[in-house]
């Protein structure tokens, strides 16, 4: 059997005994010295390591399955128009451009939903969506495609001219706003940049001396039910440490966001901001319980005229914590 699996099984056995108050080494009732035994410490370290891996697996899954669609202004400029195409082909073009964002797929139905809501499409007697006079005026046309049949019914196919495609691209933010029912993905307000494993966080900061960095860590203490954060503002060789303990929050992620928010409030003038964290905080997930605070941070920095980049260096929590601790 795989040695790693055996290690996990042994660790589970130890944790199972601790859970019912039994010292896994002596078999006696747990006393204060139990948690100081090397075998127990090794087990807890292994459990922490496994949990960290599972957290990152979950973060990767969130990126693949739950990350809200967004498109930046720069990406919009790369969108191509064609002489004539279907809405599914418009969606394909958008997805090709935003593929680097690692979000869910943009759906052609979102375009149709918005066009219908705003009077560019309407329903005919067969309940198909066809262009209204308003829709025809922007370059949407419709044809009966006799090759498309379901239950003996023929369907209309809508075609979009280059002008209609440009119109849709121009209103993508509104289409996404309608898709997310007014809860606009705040990711449209910032860039994302990965810190590759080939470069240390220290060198990443040194290589970008014109940027102002918000470097944030946080923790939660199970026994007290309190959390804390340590946040650095790093700009042109100067470092300011902001930290707070005994926060009434049961989430280390929320305490990290509170630290980022306090750092953002300390910024007085427009500058290029790079936020560095080792864990996903909910900036890309409208369903996140922390999305309100993420939105507040972005509005705070955006209102100050800051250009914002988010760098989430998953799996590098120890490195990030060591860097922050040098200045706290």
Image (cartoon, rainbow, N blue to C red):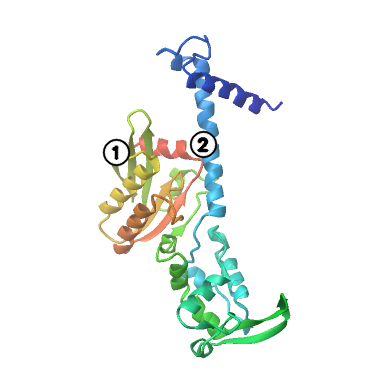
Q: Mark 1 points at which residue?
A: 247
In this view of the protein, which residue sits in the foreground, 229 or 47?
47
Residue at 50% across, 76% down: 169
Tell me if residue 237 can be seen. no
Mark 1 or mark 2: whose residue is earlier in sequence: 2
SS of the residue under disc 2:
helix
Closer to the camera in the image, 253 or 182: 182
Which label sits on residue 211? none
User: Residue 324: in sight, yes or no?
Assistant: yes
- Which quadrant is the C terminus positioned in? top left
Q: Position of residue 34 (x, y in %)?
A: 45, 14
Question: Local crowd at mark 2 within 10 Å, few (<14), some, or many (≥20)?
Answer: some
Locate residue 282 relative to residue 63 in the image: left or right.
Answer: left
Q: Quadrant of residue 36?
A: top left
The total number of labels drawn is 2
- In x, y percent, where is residue 35? 44, 17
How dense is the environment of label 1, judged by Cα within 10 Å: few (below 14), some, or many (20 and up)? some
Per the image, the residue denoted by label 2 is 52
Identify the image quadrant of the N terminus.
top right
Direction from residue 210 to residue 75 in the image, left or right: right
Determine whether 308 is above or below 9 in the image: below
The image position of residue 100, as x and y in percent, is 56, 60
Q: Is residue 322 above or below residue 118?
A: above
Q: Do the residues labelled 1 and 2 touch (CB within 8 Å)?
A: no
Residue at 33% x, 40% y: name it.
Answer: 249
* CA distance for labels 1 and 2: 23 Å
Q: Residue 97 location, x and y as percent?
A: 57, 67
Q: 43 or 88: nearer the eye?
A: 88
Residue 246: quadrant of the picture: top left
Q: Is mark 1 on a helix, strand or loop?
A: strand
């Amino acid at each position: 059997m795989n040695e790693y699996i055996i290690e996990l099984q042994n660790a589970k056995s130890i944790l199972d005994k601790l859970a019912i108050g039994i010292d896994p080494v002596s078999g006696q009732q747990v006393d204060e010295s139990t948690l100081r035994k090397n075998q127990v410490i090794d087990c807890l370290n292994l459990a922490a390591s496994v949990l960290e891996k599972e957290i990152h697996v979950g973060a990767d899954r969130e990126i693949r399955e739950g990350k809200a669609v967004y498109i930046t202004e720069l990406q919009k400029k790369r969108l191509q128009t064609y002489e004539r195409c279907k809405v599914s082909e418009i969606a394909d073009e958008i997805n090709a451009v935003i593929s680097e964002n690692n979000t869910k797929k943009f759906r052609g139905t979102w375009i149709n939903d918005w066009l219908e809501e705003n009077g560019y499409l309407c329903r005919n007697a067969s309940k198909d969506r066809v262009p209204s006079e308003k829709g025809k005026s922007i370059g949407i046309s419709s044809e009966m495609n006799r090759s498309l049949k379901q239950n003996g019914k023929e369907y209309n196919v809508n075609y979009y001219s280059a002008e209609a495609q440009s119109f849709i691209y121009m209103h993508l933010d509104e289409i996404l706003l309608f898709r997310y029912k007014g809860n606009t993905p705040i990711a449209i307000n910032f860039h994302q940049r990965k810190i590759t494993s080939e470069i240390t966080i220290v060198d990443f900061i040194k290589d970008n001396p014109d940027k102002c960095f918000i470097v944030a860590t946080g923790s939660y203490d199970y026994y007290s039910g309190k959390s804390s954060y340590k946040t650095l503002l790093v700009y042109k060789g100067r470092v300011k440490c902001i930290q707070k303990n005994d926060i009434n929050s049961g989430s280390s992620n929320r305490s990290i966001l509170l630290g980022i928010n306090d750092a953002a409030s300390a910024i007085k003038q427009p500058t290029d901001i790079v936020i560095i964290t080792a864990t996903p905080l909910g900036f890309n997930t409208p369903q996140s319980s922390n999305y309100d605070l993420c939105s507040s941070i972005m509005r705070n920095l955006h209102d100050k005229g800051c250009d914002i980049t988010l760098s989430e260096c998953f799996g590098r929590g120890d490195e990030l914590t060591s860097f922050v601790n040098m200045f706290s």
